[in-house]
Image (spheres, coloured by chain):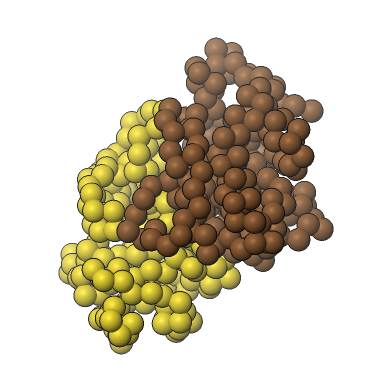
Chain colours: A yellow, B brown
Amino acid sequence: MELLKERIRKDGVIKEGNVLKVDSFLNHRMDIDLINQIGREFAVRFEGEKIDQIMTIEASGIGIAAITAQYFNCPVVFAKKTQSINLDGNVLTARVESFTKKKTYDVMVESRFVRPGENILIIDDFMAKGYAARGLVEIIQQAGAKVAGIGIVIEKGFQHGGDGLREDGIRVESLAIIEEMDATAQKIVFRE
Amino acid sequence: MELLKERIRKDGVIKEGNVLKVDSFLNHRMDIDLINQIGREFAVRFEGEKIDQIMTIEASGIGIAAITAQYFNCPVVFAKKTQSINLDGNVLTARVESFTKKKTYDVMVESRFVRPGENILIIDDFMAKGYAARGLVEIIQQAGAKVAGIGIVIEKGFQHGGDGLREDGIRVESLAIIEEMDATAQKIVFRE
């Protein structure tokens, strides 16, 4: 998605340790016009797929998933990362390692919100090693539902999470795949 | 907002301890059609107000804020609750007590995302004692920006957070205000 790549080149900041900051338009401050175009692009990529529900993970996936869901006319369920008195039913759980927060945590979805046989599209802002997406895939499979695909805004191709999921036969559509990035030169190479 | 009150009556579950669960349509699974109507209603309530940005707080405010922002043609900034290597600039902070999670935490917004003089609309899913909203008001004031108003989907009127903010001269528009609720009878009385 050319508009997105341009925006990453213009406003993304590369930090040491393979961190790409896009917080001025994607995951702290959200440019809603851009996210709308992102939602429309996911709708084009997954056209013809029957999508019953979108699943994402709190927090930065939620806004993107909510706007994307408007194009699919479907609800969104977001996996939670922290226990709350609001989470009191039967809960599906998967263990996930976070790249940016340097810790592992459980992702949780109440089982009544994932129905057997449902086709679920996973949407998230970033994919690095793919651990969060794998956690959601695990939850969907635990529920006897199907993964229709994974839509990612920015994939860090050099961390190979997306490649691994594709090798496992899961359709992963990433709107921008970064092949290389260099914090010193502030240079990004996207996958063709 | 009648449609919302009907939905709360139909699908809301009242638990002991003044907890109202609306996770089947608002803050775990999100009914995107309903949230769209909610966004439209906020646009009607705040019509004529100049809104430069919407501010919310992770996680369950984000989807509602993102969809609402489409009606205001403005960006969204969401306050974060956990430190991350992505949060490394000058950060505005306020201390907040959580009703549902029984703990206090810091809410954080990078200062470059709140500009002096900006008119900011706060959007959130719930208001009980109003602590989260007060945290966001504090952050906005620290930045020298203005609170254009607060839009809340469900206000627990009997916990008086909204009343306190209104007494302080802040415009609070809540789409459903609960005056009383009873876990035993599963009965809700809305404020007229």
Towards the viewer: B132 or A134 = B132
Tell me which corner region of the image, top left, top right, bottom left or bottom right, holds residue A129. bottom left
Q: Residue furthest right?
A: B48
Q: Quadrant of the C terminus of chain A?
A: bottom left
Location of residue A83 in the rendering, given as x and y in whole percent from the top left corner:
35, 34
Placement of A95 over or under B67, stated as above or below: above
Q: Which residue is painted at 32% across and 35% down in the image?
A: A91
Towards the viewer: B141 or A191 = B141
Q: Residue furthest top?
A: B184
Does A11 sit left or right of B174 as displayed?
left
Q: Which residue is painted at 49% across and 39% down in the image?
A: B95
Q: Which residue is painted at 43% across and 38% down in the image?
A: B105
Placement of A55 over or under B163, stated as above or below: below
Q: Can residue A76 be seen in this view?
A: no
Q: Which residue is painted at 22% across and 47% down in the image?
A: A104
Location of residue B162 in the rendering, given as x and y in whole percent from the top left corner:
68, 33
Location of residue B96 in the rendering, given as x and y in whole percent from the top left corner:
50, 37
Tell me which corner region of the image, top left, top right, bottom left or bottom right, holds residue A189. bottom left
Q: Quadrant of the N terminus of chain A?
A: bottom left
